[in-house]
Amino acid sequence: MSIGVCYFPEHWPDEDWERDVVAMADAGLDYVRMAEFSWGVLEPERGSFEFEWLDRALDLIDDRGMQAVLCTPTAAPPRWLVDERPEILQQERDGTVREAGSRRHYCFNSPAYREETERVVRKLAERYADDSRVAGWQTDNEYGCHGTAYCYCDDCADAFGEWVSDRFEDAADLNEAWGTTFWSQQYDSLSDVDVPRPTPAQDHPALALAFARFTSDAILDYNRLQTEILREHGAPFVTHNFMHLYPAIDLHEASADLDFLSWDSYPTGHVQEGEGEASADELRAGDPDLLSLNHDLYRSVGGAPFWVMEQQPGDVNWPPHSPQPGEGAMRLWAHQAVAHGADSVVYFRWRRCLEGQEQYHAGLRKADGSPDRGYDDATEAAEEFKTLTDLDLPEAPVAILHDYETLWALDGREHAPDFDYWTLLGAFYDALRARGVAVDVVSPEDDLAYDAVIAPALYTASEETADRLEEFVREGGQLLLGPRSGVADEYNKLRSAQPGPLADLVGATVEGFETVPPELPRSVESEDGDRYPIRIWAEWLARDEAAAEYIYTGEDVTGGRPAVVSNPVGDGQATYAGLWPEPDLADELVGSMLERAGIDHTERFPDGVRVSVRDGHVWLCNFTSEPVDVVLDDGEWVLGGPRVEPFDVAVAETNRLSGLSLD
C-alpha cells in the first residue's frame, strides 16, 4: 500500500523543485506522477524536444528514494500543432468545432492525430519507458472528460461507416436488423450510414446503440496505439486514469490492454452529480457507497489491485459547490480505497496552482509551498500503510452484473425522468454494502463463481447470458434480477414478450408496466403484510411456475398483481423484482438472498457508516459527523479502536464479519 502525489514542475520556478521533492519524501510518499499535460513544454515547436527539465525532476525524485509515474501528454495537444493540423479537432453534433483553449480537443479517429500521437509517445518511450526512475506509465488523461467521448467530424463519420460495414453484408441486412422501416428510415446503401446528426426527435435506437459501441471501440483502439508503443519499449506497467462511473467506455474491454485500471476520486464532487440533494455529511466526505462502487468496479474489471490516480486533496474547483472536506476526510478516503483493493492512492495535486483553469483546486500544499489541510492526512495515511503490506485482494461472495450494452441501450429510452442506470444498480449495491458484504462488479460474460449474483437490469440479455444464469442457479446459486431485463435484442429492438430469454428462469413474464411519478405513489406488500413504497418503475407479472413474494397494493390497475416473484431451479433460486426498490425494500430483498445463500454479513449499518473486508482485516469507515461506537466480538484492533470519531477509520483483524456491530 502506498501514497503518491501529482506534480507539475513546469508550473514552478526551478529553485522550488528540490524543496518540493524533499517535502514529498519527508511525507513518506512513494510515487510522483508527472508530465500528463506537458506536450507544449516537452516539444515547444515541431521536432525540437526539451527533456532536460524532466530529467532534472526525475533525478530529484530518484535521489529521495521515490519513483515517477510518467504520463503521455496527448490529452493537451499544443496550439502550434492545432495551427498546423486543424483537422485533429473534434466537432459537436451540429458541426461546431471544439477549438483549442483548454484540453481534450482532439478526435480519437483523426488519422492526423493518431500520427502525431504515435510520434510523441514513441519519442518519450524511447527515452524513458524502461528508465529505472520510472515506475510505470499512464496513457493520456481521463478519456472522454468534458463530454469529449463523442465526436461527429468527417473522420468519425468515415470510421463509423467502416465499422458498420464490417458488421453487415449490405443495406438490406442492416435494415432488417435495425428495424428501419419505422418512419421510413431505410438505408439504400451501407455508405449512407452517418453518425447521428441533429434531428427533430430521438435518434433511432439501433443507430444510437451502434454509435455508442463504435465510440467505445474507437477510444480503446486509440488507447491501444499508445500501450503497444510503451510496451514495445519496456514500460514496467501501463494504466489509464478513468473517471467516476463513466458510461462511454466499456471497461471490460479496456482492461485487456492495461496492466491494471486506475480512476480519479473526488468524493465531494461526485456526490453533487447524482440524483437528489447531498446531505451535509456527504458534502464534507462524500457518499461511501458511491465511492466504493467505483473502487469495486475498477478492481473487479481489472482483476487486479487498482490505483486511485487522482485523490481529492481538499476543496476542488469544478462541482457546483466546493465545501471544505471534514477533518480527516482525505485520510479516510485513502483507507477506504485500500480496503476495497487499491495498491496506491495518488493525491491530486502537490501545490495549488497559480495559473490556468484549476487555480481554485487545492493541493496537499498551498501555493506558497506550505502545508495545506490534506498534507497531514496524506502523511498519516502513508505511515499507516507501512503496516498494511502484501494484502490479498478482497474475496467477494456476491457479484453485481454491470452491462455497458444495457447502459447504452437505455440511454434516451429511460421512459421516466428519474430512471438512471447507475442509480438503479446503486440501490442493490448500497443494500449489500450496508450489510458489510464484499462485492465484485463484473460483466454478464464473466465467470460466476459466487454464492449469489444480482443483475439490477439486463436490458439486452442474450440467450447465452440466460443459459449461463440458469446454470448458475441450477448448481445452487442465488440470483436476484431487477426490472427491465430481457427487454430488447442486440440491436435495441423490443422483444415480443419480456423478460425474453430469462422468462423460463424466473417462471414469469411481464404483463404490463408503468412509470411512477411522485404524485402517483405506489407500494407493495409481502405475504407477512409488510408494506414498502416504490418509485420510478413498476412492472406487474404473470406467473407461470413462480411464486409471488410481493404484490402491489391498492385497487387500481396494478392492485393485487405480483411485483416480485421467486422460482426454484435445481439447487438454487431465481428472484425477479419488476420494480425500482426504495432502501427498505432493497434491504429486504438483499437480506433474504444473503440468508438463503448463507453469506456472512453484519446488521444493517446506518448511511455513512460502512465496513469493508480485505485479507482478514476489517475497516470501519465513518463518513458522518458523529462518533460511532463499535463492538468487536472476535479479533483485535490494529488501528484505532471501538470509538470511531467523525470522518475517521478503524481497522481490526478478524475473520468473522457478523461479529462486528454498532453499540
Image (spheres, rainbow, N blue to C red):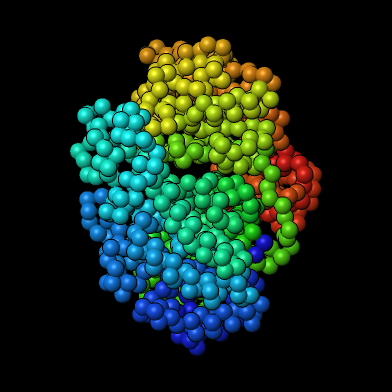
* 94 or 3, nearer to the observer: 94
Q: Position of residue 642 (x, y in %)?
A: 71, 51
Q: Position of residue 47 (x, y in %)?
A: 39, 79
In the image: residue 535, left or right of residue 79 = right
Whether residue 370 sits left or right of residue 451 in the image: it is: left
Vertical order, 342 against 479 (above or below): below
Give above or below for 370 relative to 179.
below
| Foreground of the two, 534 or 661 | 534
The picture quadrant where one finds residue 602 is top right
Locate residue 442: give its quadrant: top right
**Residue 537 x, y percent position in the rendering:** 41, 27
Residue 535 versus residue 537: which sits nearer the camera? 537
Residue 516 in sight here: no
Q: Position of residue 490 (x, y in %)?
A: 42, 32
Query: Going by the image, does 52 lie left or right of 328?
Result: left
Residue at 31% over, 63% down? 88
Query: In this view, which residue lies farthest toward the front?
Result: 169
Residue at position x 45%, y 85% from top? 13
In the foreground, 172 or 56: 172
Q: Quadrant of the C terminus?
A: top right
Q: Residue furthest left?
A: 200
Q: Residue at 34% x, 50% y: name it.
A: 159
Residue 112 appears anywhere in the view: yes
Rendered residue at 54%/32% (across/down): 455
For the N terminus, the quadrant is bottom right
In the image, is residue 9 above or below residue 90? below
